[in-house]
């Protein structure tokens, strides 16, 4: 955190970066802790690490990566980020370049882990085959994006000193990072659409709309990403080359992109209903936390006749209604009684 002696002015904008970085990290950490804590102890149960799944561990890794990225940005500030280049010593510039170089890898890793968390969560819900294929494609695309971004970043300014971004010869980094962030934005939009498509079959209307809003939060990534692209090309076309000062807006935008990517994955789990979703609920194989029972049940057909059936069903209580809802393991029948009170599934 910035020391009391630091002041924000036109010649030193570094403290503003420090403040933005750590506020974003703290908010993100609180969201993830709330998400993981919800999974550790569901509905008053004892805390049990077995409740955590692969997506939880990936989310924690993304938080750790974001923490490391925040530390490197803070170290960049100490090395001269936010100050004019002509006010820095050669030693400060060399240190700044190396820390900036390391921050790029952590930035890409944070986004990769956060996106992978969202995809893994969708896969664990065992959606319909078409959506399953889309999620698998997104995972492959996200992995390819990470590998390509990492390799390109590693040699952005050539050998033997690829970190020399200030005084070295680099490729068009403005275009490169613009492409990287646009692809990330497109990936998140696709992931949001798929997750919303899975959630849309929920039988609880109010909960469904709330979850749709939370999953749609990934669309908000377009805002900081658009600002970052704008700042990148503004710096590129600037007549005065002062990277340590002109990069401030780019760095803050990058911090917002990384933070919002992680938080968009954690936000849906602020809804208590998410703590009860189980693999296969989107296809009817398993639907919320339920107790299985076997017996005879009835339903009313469209003509008004009462029909009996014997099948393995599960009894659960909808958190929004007082009636007990019956489901069975299997796939949805074409006809379902409206009113969200009874759900019948083909055995």
Image (cartoon, rainbow, N blue to C red):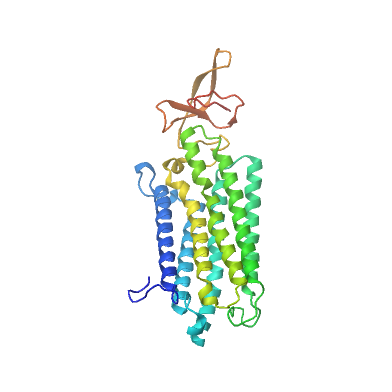
Residue 107 is drawn in which quadrant?
A: bottom right
Which one is in front, 58 or 15?
A: 15
| Identity of the residue furthest to the left in this view | 4
Whether residue 315 is situated above or below residue 191 in the rendered picture: above
Name which residue lies at 36% across and 44% down. Answer: 45
Q: Is residue 169 left or right of residue 51?
A: right
Q: In what quadrant of the picture does the N terminus appear?
A: bottom left
Residue 180 at x, y = what percent?
A: 62, 63
Count of numbered circles on the image = 0
Which one is in front, 310 or 332?
A: 332
Whether residue 271 is situated above or below residue 30 in the rendered picture: above
Which one is in front, 240 or 208?
A: 240
Residue 143 is drawn in which quadrant?
A: bottom right
Name which residue lies at 50% across and 70% down. Answer: 248
Residue 216 at x, y = what percent?
A: 53, 46
Which one is in front, 181 or 327?
A: 181
Name which residue lies at 41% across and 65% down. Answer: 22
Residue 252 at x, y = what percent?
A: 49, 65
| Identity of the residue furthest to the bottom in this view | 90
Q: In what quadrant of the picture does the C terminus appear?
A: top right
Whether residue 47 is situated above or below residue 316 in the rendered picture: below
| Identity of the residue furthest to the front in this view | 239
Whether residue 200 is situated above or below residue 297 in the rendered picture: below
Residue 176 at x, y = what percent?
A: 64, 67
């Amino acid at each position: 955190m910035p020391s009391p002696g630091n002041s924000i002015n036109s010649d030193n904008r570094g403290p503003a970066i420090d403040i933005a970085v750590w506020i974003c990290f703290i908010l993100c950490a609180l969201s993830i802790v709330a998400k993981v804590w919800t999974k550790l102890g569901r509905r008053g149960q004892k805390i049990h690490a077995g409740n955590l799944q692969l997506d939880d561990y990936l989310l924690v890794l993304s938080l750790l990566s974001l923490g490391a990225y925040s530390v490197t940005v803070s170290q960049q500030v100490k090395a001269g980020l936010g100050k004019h280049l002509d006010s820095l010593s050669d030693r400060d510039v060399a240190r700044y370049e190396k820390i900036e170089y390391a921050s790029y890898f952590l930035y890409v890793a944070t986004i990769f882990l956060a996106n992978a968390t969202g995809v893994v969560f969708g896969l664990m819900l065992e959606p319909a085959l078409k959506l399953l294929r889309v999620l698998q494609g997104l995972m492959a695309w996200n992995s390819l994006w990470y590998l390509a971004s990492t390799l390109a970043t590693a040699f952005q300014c050539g050998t033997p000193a690829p970190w020399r971004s200030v005084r070295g010869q680099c490729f068009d980094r403005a275009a490169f990072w613009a492409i990287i962030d646009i692809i990330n934005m497109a990936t998140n939009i696709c992931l949001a659409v798929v997750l919303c498509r899975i959630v849309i079959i929920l039988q609880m209307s109010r909960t469904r709309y709330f979850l749709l809003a939370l999953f749609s939060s990934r669309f908000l990534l377009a805002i900081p990403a658009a600002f970052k692209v704008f700042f990148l090309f503004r710096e590129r076309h600037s007549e005065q080359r002062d990277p340590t000062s002109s990069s401030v807006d780019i760095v803050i935008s990058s911090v917002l992109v990384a933070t919002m990517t992680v938080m968009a994955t954690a936000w849906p789990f602020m809804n208590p209903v998410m703590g009860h979703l189980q693999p296969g609920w989107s296809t009817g194989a398993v639907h919320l936390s339920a107790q299985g029972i076997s017996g005879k049940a009835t339903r009313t057909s469209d003509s008004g006749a009462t029909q009996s059936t014997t099948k393995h069903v599960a009894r659960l209580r909808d958190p929004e209604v007082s009636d007990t809802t019956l489901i069975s393991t299997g796939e949805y029948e074409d006809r379902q009684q409206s009113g969200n009170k009874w759900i019948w599934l083909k055995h």
